[in-house]
Structures are given as C-alpha cells and as structure tokens.
Image: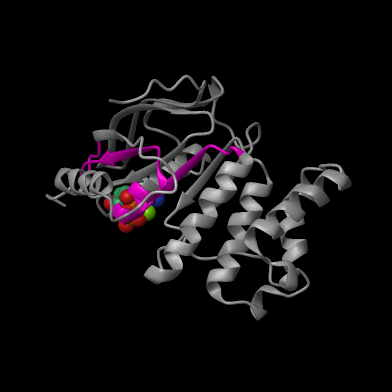
C-alpha cells in the first residue's frame, strides 16, 4: 500500500537513548527523516518528545546513540535549525516585517533575497496590512503565525515545531494547519511537528511516529499517503485516526 519514498535521508536518529540521572526517558530510538518530509510525533505526556528536540539543538547530549543531519553529527553551529514552541516568541520591539527579516539578516542573506522570501511569507500569511504593526498589536495566534513564517523564511535544514497550536481553539487550528501546509509546500522544508492532537497529526503528516510511555521507544511509524488537502470526514482519514488512537489507548 505504501509508496516507496525516494527522497534522500535528511536526519538519522541512531540508537538514541537518554537518561536524566536515573530517569530513563528515551530507549534506543532509531528512525530516519527524509528531505522535505513532514513528520508528526505523538506520544504520552513526559515520554521525551521535547527532550528529543533539545538533543537535536544540543541543549542536552544523548546518553548514547547519535543524531545526524546530512550525514554529519547534528550541530546547531553547522546546521540551520529553526524551532517553534507553544508560546509565541516574537521580538516585541520589531514590526511584523522586521521580525520576519531578523534571522535572515543575522545569516547575512543578500538584501534582495531577504525581500523576496519575506514578501512570499507575508503573502501566504495574508499579512500585508499588518507588515508595519508590532506583535503587541496582534492576537496571540497572529503572533504565532509570524513566528512560524519566520521559521520557514530561514529555509532551515530542519524545522522543529513543539505543539505550536497547543493553546489555539479548534476552528483556528484548522486554518493554521492549512497555512503551515502551504508554507511547507512552498519552501520544501523538512518538518518535525510534535502534537497531542491525533486528528492534527493525520491531517498534516506524511508519516506519524508514535512513541510509547517512557522509557520511550517507537510503537509504530504510520505511513500516511492520503492526498492533500485531507478530508477529515473521509472513511480513510477516520480509519487512520482510529488506528493511531488504538496504538495509544494505554496512555
Ligand atoms: N533537564 C531535565 N532534568 C531532569 N529531568 C528532565 C529534564 N528535562 C525533562 N526531564 C524529564 O524527562 C521526561 C521527558 O520530558 P519531556 O519534556 O521531553 O516530555 P514530553 O514528551 O515533551 O512531554 P509533554 O507531552 O508534556 O510535552 C519527563 O519525565 C521530564 O520530567
Ligand atoms: Mg514537550
């Protein structure tokens, strides 16, 4: 049933194990992420999802095992990693447009290229009339959209999203999920998206990684070949949602 994925491997997770003192969090986790893939990660509270991201960005070192990006050990000094967390973190003293440009200027991307990338983002986000506004003048959800736009504008090797829509209501989520898919399509970014929301995982991801309780290992990696845009009321969608829910019923 599953199509063969011919894309090259972007991220390799090899026998990753993490202890905090005597607390065993991740247990021998191995999988690959393909270049340009949209992968969701679901798993019980406290199983080590955020810890996994924190090892990619080297906030924590693995106890054993390794993380590789393009074949090299993951290193934020070498690799371009962008992160989006649940709490929006824009720069309040910069306008929307300046926020979007900020990281690109630090990376010394040529001015013309910065303008082009930022214009594309502003259009996809429909923020033309807010480009000179400050984050405090926007709603929390709009601020988060800017953070997400800023992350895609960096054209990162890997975009890590940790429950970015955690606090949004359901209607807004549908809208934001479509937006993130548009950005992903447009930029071809490799995305790891952590969520507790199974419907969201089925709506967004090409593959969904299910983690067990800690010490967490891989319960299953679900291949999702449903065509985009996905219909959450279709039989296939519901079947997949039910299957993932079955896998995690013991949460
Ligand atoms: N710096 C740390 N020192 C000690 N224990 C930690 C540290 N960071 C995380 N932990 C513990 O490791 C486990 C995994 O935490 P983590 O935040 O990665 O879980 P999570 O899967 O992201 O959970 P949630 O779904 O609630 O976001 C938890 O038991 C947590 O208390
Ligand atoms: Mg977490």
Between 41 and 69, the one lying in front of the other is: 41
57 displayed left or right of 228:
right
Depth check: give the residue in front, 237 or 148: 237
User: Furthest residue to the left?
Assistant: 250
Which residue appears farthest toward the front when viewing the image?
234
- Colour scheme shown: one colour
Look at the image and say whether residue 100 sits in the magenta stretch.
Answer: no
Residue 78, by quadrant, is top right
111 in relation to 131, above or below: above
Pick the quarter of the image with the N terminus.
Answer: top left
Q: Residue 131, located in which quarter of the rendered image? A: bottom right
Q: Is residue 121 left or right of residue 17?
A: right
Residue 196 seen anywhere in this rendered image of the structure: no
248 shown above or below 128: above
Left or right, residue 83 beside residue 241: right
Residue located at (58% from left, 56% from top) = 148
Residue at image position (38%, 43%) is 40
Residue 62 at what x, y percent from top left?
A: 41, 33
Please name the residue shown 43% across and 22% down the image. 5
Which of 93/98 is in front?
Answer: 98
Above or below, comparing residue 32 to residue 108 in the picture: above
Q: Judge whether residue 189 is colored magenta.
A: yes
- Give the magenta-colored segment's residue range: 188-217
At which x and y percent is residue 90? 64, 65
Q: Position of residue 216 (x, y in %)?
A: 25, 39
């Amino acid at each position: 049933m599953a199509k063969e994925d011919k894309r090259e491997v972007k991220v390799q997770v090899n026998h990753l194990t993490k202890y905090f003192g005597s607390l065993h969090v991740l247990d021998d986790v191995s999988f690959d992420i393909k270049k340009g893939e949209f992968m969701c990660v679901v798993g019980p509270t406290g199983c080590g999802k955020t810890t996994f991201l924190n090892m990619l960005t080297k906030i924590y070192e693995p106890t054993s095992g390794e993380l590789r990006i393009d074949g090299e050990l993951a290193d934020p000094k070498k690799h371009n990693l962008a992160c989006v967390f649940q709490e929006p973190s824009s720069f309040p003293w910069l306008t929307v447009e300046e926020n979007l440009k900020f990281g690109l200027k630090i990376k010394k991307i040529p001015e013309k290229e910065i303008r082009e990338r930022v214009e594309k983002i502003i259009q996809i986000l429909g923020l033309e009339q807010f480009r000179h506004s400050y984050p405090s003048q926007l709603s929390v959800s709009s601020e988060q959209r800017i953070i997400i736009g800023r992350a895609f504008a960096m054209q990162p090797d890997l975009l890590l999203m940790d429950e970015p829509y955690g606090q949004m209501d359901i209607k807004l989520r549908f809208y934001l999920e479509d937006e993130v898919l548009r950005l992903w399509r447009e930029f071809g970014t490799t995305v790891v998206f952590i969520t507790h929301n199974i419907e969201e995982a089925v709506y967004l991801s090409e593959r969904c990684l299910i983690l067990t309780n800690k010490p967490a290992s891989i319960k299953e990696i679900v291949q999702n070949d449903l065509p985009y845009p996905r219909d959450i009321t279709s039989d296939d969608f519901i079947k997949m949602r039910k299957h993932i829910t079955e896998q995690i019923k013991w949460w």
